[in-house]
Amino acid sequence: MTAELVRGQNHPLSVARLEIRVSASHPVVAGATLADADGRIPGAEWVAHPASPRVPGLEVSRQAAAGHRLAVDLDALPEAVHRVNVLLALPSGGNGPASFGAMAAPFLAVTGTDGAEIASYTVTDLDAESAVVALELYRRQGAWKVRAVGQGYAGGLTAMLHDQGLSGAAELAASIDEAVAQGVARAVSAPPAQRTGGGTGALRTAPAGGAAADGRDTGAAARAGPAAGQGPGTGGSGAGAAAAQPPAGSGPISYRHPGRSTSTPPEPAPAAPPAEPGQPSRPVAGDATGWSMEERLYNQVWGMFEDLARTTAAYRSAVDFAESRLEQELDRVLSDPRTRVGPAADAAREEARAKQAQLVEQARSVLDRDLAQLVAEAEVVEHALPAAFARWDSPVWQGYQVPLERPMALRLGDLHLPERRDLRIPMLVRLPLQRGLWVDSGRAQGGPEAGLLDSAEMRRLAVDCAVAHAVRLLAVHSVGDYAVHVIDPAGAAGSALAPLLEQGALREPPAAGAQGVSEVLARLTRRVDLVQMAVRSGAVESLPPDLDTGEHLLIVNDFPHGFDDRAVTQLRYLADEGPSVGVHLMMVADREDARAYGPVLDPLWRSLLRITPVPDDHLADPWVGHAWTYEPSLVPVGSDVMRQVLWQVGQARKAYGI
Amino acid sequence: MTVNLSKGQGISLQKADGGTLTAVRMGLGWQAAPRRGLFGTRTKEIDLDASAVLFADKQPVDVAFFQQLVSKDGSVRHTGDNLVGGAGQGGDDESILVDLQRVPVHVNQIVFTVNSFTGQTFAEVRNAFCRLVDESTGQELARYTLDGGGPYTAQIMAKVHRVGTGWQMTAIGTPANGRTFQDLLAEIQAVL
């Protein structure tokens, strides 16, 4: 009777002389390890493998082949041996498959010397493994049994031998590989597996009878039969052992319920096309970690930011070093009276200058290489950015639709370094904003346009800039989640705010005059106070019904015009406490206007993120602290995109009845 | 295969197949020696710190250590301070990753040091080692054992320096005393 084993199942062996036939679709290495009662291999001499094919009672073939016959004499095994593992491995190198998953499942049959099949096992469910313990012959209460194991190892022979407690597993695996490689090299002309007929008395090979010739047929017949091994033929203790043995998985056990998915797995990152040899790989948008494309792009932009900061730091540090070395060397030439003048001095100076030029050139070439890669990456990333991360002139804003949820970040502008002005890194800030914004309408300090613009022009630009940011904030939030309030005591920003008013983005006209200022501030202060109290005491449901839970943006123009001391204090309270409860501040102000307050307002300015309406190099990166030139993201001149976006938002608001 | 370095011995970081290394990792592992005594729980924890100092023409220009985990150019990264050791159970407790391709052109030597921040000498440390691993393959290139370091609180372990277009590692193993790498700068100058 033939038992077709499934993984973990065992079967008694009634005869001592066995032959194990292996059939595979590609050449495999067959071997066997002898283990003691604890399942450990005491030493390398207990392993039968192509480099050393014989151990007492067992012989394997010397090379990789698609078919093997392993002769086993259980009676001739040393007394200490309690377990024989029959293993298969894929030869490394060559053009065969690299893992068992890439080929048909190997088939093993245990037969007696007369060719009668006792048990068979098809090693299924293998994937990335390149070595597998296929069968195990083991001693149990004086009798031998065979068990189908099917334990695969992605780490190959080394991992398998190591797992069986063999010290020097890597060396043995290497020697096996080498022997197999030699066998493969030999195999070109050598005749097929030459099997020696019993070197030791114990070793006997099966007569090359019909069983070998039609081995596949009997195997197939055995598979076609009913699951005989699970029938009553299996001994009681054997069945118990089979049940106790967990099904050996091919690789780590997955505890996941097959029919349940707890959360949506992240969509796979876009695969980078393979790089041309000798070329850096072509950049791909979204080539970063994250659960969504948005998060990946955000992380990629920050990765580019850091890479640019650091590669520039390396360049600047190399250039600085070259300069200081040049100075030192020139000093040395000068300080030595013998070399101060004359041709020797000139030569020394020349040499020092050449050294400096060479180092700078080297540094520049490294920088250029990195910058070229970043420019290429910025190019693909810029086109893939969603609206919240994109420039106003990006096509995604033309096809704008009101989103259903808030994005994770917002683009406030671009950042660049003087080394490469056309390499713009999007400046993304997380939403909800952690700190307020301050659009500085004062005189730009370092920008190229500083001094060219008069104060009135700067104020106008600052208001335009603030409106562009406000529209962007409105547009990326879902309908009704974001409300904008404006304090404009003197009405100075009237025309810039007109689009917001026309489309109903502002629920009421800008608060004017001292009274308007105090009214708006009092309302928002009350809201912050109530929500904070509710959150602290865990009583959010007891908030008054007229309090909406959306976020609020307060734009303050012309500060401190129209503000009394009480209003200033309230404003500081909003700047400090507002962000945590969804009340955000955007100041459009010139610090000089408020200098009468003295240093008491310094904490307010420091707590706000300063951005400018014109390019200005005032922002530092968190890694190296370079001064980055910030450029606000403004609507291109003559473009109607902001009005369109506001119209869409207004339509959506009407549709929702808000 | 791993090379057990002895003092002053150098190995080239060229790969066997002729390619140069792109990323190496310096790993530091240790365990506190148990103290005999009544209050076993009062075993003082030992904080060893690995640092990498980048030198250009014998001038220190950059560093990666527990207070600045990434060098300014981003080429050398410290994976984080370990205050007690033994967490790796024979593995690395602190690691410094060096992206050799990204090291600025003027930096021609990187010196790895170990300091005992808590002040115990190496005589009180067990199973301390420093090793260099090819980060792209995970293969150990060199290992240096610190045990029985004697009454010292610091050691200059090894340096990786430019040779031609590639890099070479030299074991140094000079004992010294100091709490952080700054205390060792004079000693380091001697081995550059």
Image: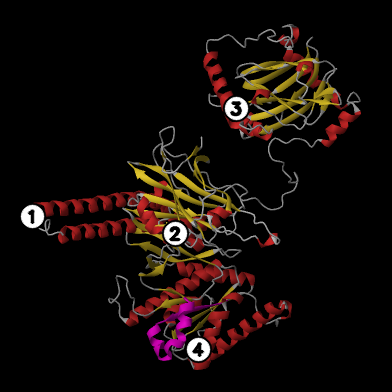
What residue is rendered at 85% in x and 22% in y?
Answer: A143
Q: CA distance from mark 3 to mark 1?
A: 70 Å
- State the separation of the CA atoms marked 2 and 1: 44 Å
Q: Main secondary structure of the magenta part?
A: helix
Residue wearing tag 1? A342
Q: Which mark is residue B181?
A: 2
Label 1 sits on what residue type? Gly
Residue linked to disc 3:
A172
Binning the other alpha carbons within 10 Å of mark 2 as few (below 14), some (14 to 19) or many (20 upward) gives many
Between disc 3 and disc 4, the foreground one is 3
Residue A568 shows which numbered tag? 4
Contact flag, marks 3 and 4 (Cβ < 8 Å): no
Left or right of A521: which side holds A533? right
Viewer-closest of A652 and A376: A376
To the question of a shared chain for discs 2 and 3, the answer is no
Under mark 4, the amino acid is Val
To which chain does the residue with label 3 belong?
A
Residue drawn at 76 percent across, 33 percent down: A38
* Numbered circle sitting on residue A437: none
- The alpha-carbon separation of the residues under discs 2 and 3 comes to 43 Å
Which residue occupies 75% across, 44% down?
A258
Q: Quadrant of residue A219?
A: top right
